[in-house]
Image: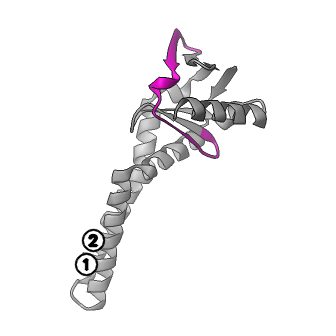
Amino acid sequence: MHLEFSYNKEDVLNALRYHFMQRGEIKVFRNTLLILMLFALAGYTFQIVTIGALIGIGAMILLIALVFWYLLPVSIYNKAATFKDDIHLNYSEEGIVISTRTSEFQRELSWSNFTQVIEAKKFFFLYRGKKNFFLVPTSAFKSEAAQKEFGKLAKDKIA
């Protein structure tokens, strides 16, 4: 089957946010900051922590949240030329072939190159490791049946 698509910036940014929020180290970091904030609030309640320290901890948490929610996805989007190009994708029982409008080079990847597939509302995430993935927008499919067929094929082959 053949797909042609280009990426919507806002959808890609949301997909990148989803990816980062699912990472184990980010979950640990997020939970650690939450616990720190709870201890700071408890300390302030019992007059162990000053208002200045509480505001400082809150500002630090807000700054870190802004970096993970806005700056990190935007910087990755801006660095990756793939997100700004038109993608041509052919998929079959053997794997996928990816090419772009601006390059005649075709990249062939067998399904064994992928380690995991995640189907989200707007994308299929085809992981080639913990950090590398290829996004296939669900809007690229001509029908819901074609989308389901791709999802089933990917899940069967990347198991």
Front residue of this view, candidates 66 and 39: 39
Whole-percent x and y of residue 113? 45, 24
Could you say which disc has been placed on residue 56 in the image? 2
Could you say which disc has been placed on residue 52 in the image? 1
Quadrant of the image occupied by residue 130? top left
**Residue situated furthest left in the rendering:** 48
Quadrant location, the N terminus: top right
State the residue at coordinates (47%, 36%). Answer: 77
Q: Secondary structure at mark 2?
A: helix
Residue 134 lies in magenta, yes or no? Answer: no
In-image side of 53 versus 68 (left or right): left
Q: Secondary structure at mark 1?
A: helix
Quadrant of the image occupied by residue 141? top right
Front residue of this view, candidates 24 and 3: 24
Whole-percent x and y of residue 101? 59, 15
Does any portion of residue 7 appear in the rendered image?
A: no
The amino acid marked with disc number 1 is Gly
Does any portion of residue 111 appear in the rendered image?
A: yes
Whole-percent x and y of residue 69? 44, 53
Residue 103 lies in magenta, yes or no? Answer: yes
The amino acid marked with disc number 2 is Gly
Q: Gap between marks 2 and 1, in whole Å?
A: 6 Å
Front residue of this view, candidates 115 and 78: 115
In-image side of 155 versus 17 (left or right): right
Q: What range of the chain is rendered magenta?
A: 101-123
Disc 2 crowd rating (10 Å Cα; few below 14, some 14-19, many 20+) is few
Residue 121's place in the image compared with 33, above or below, is above
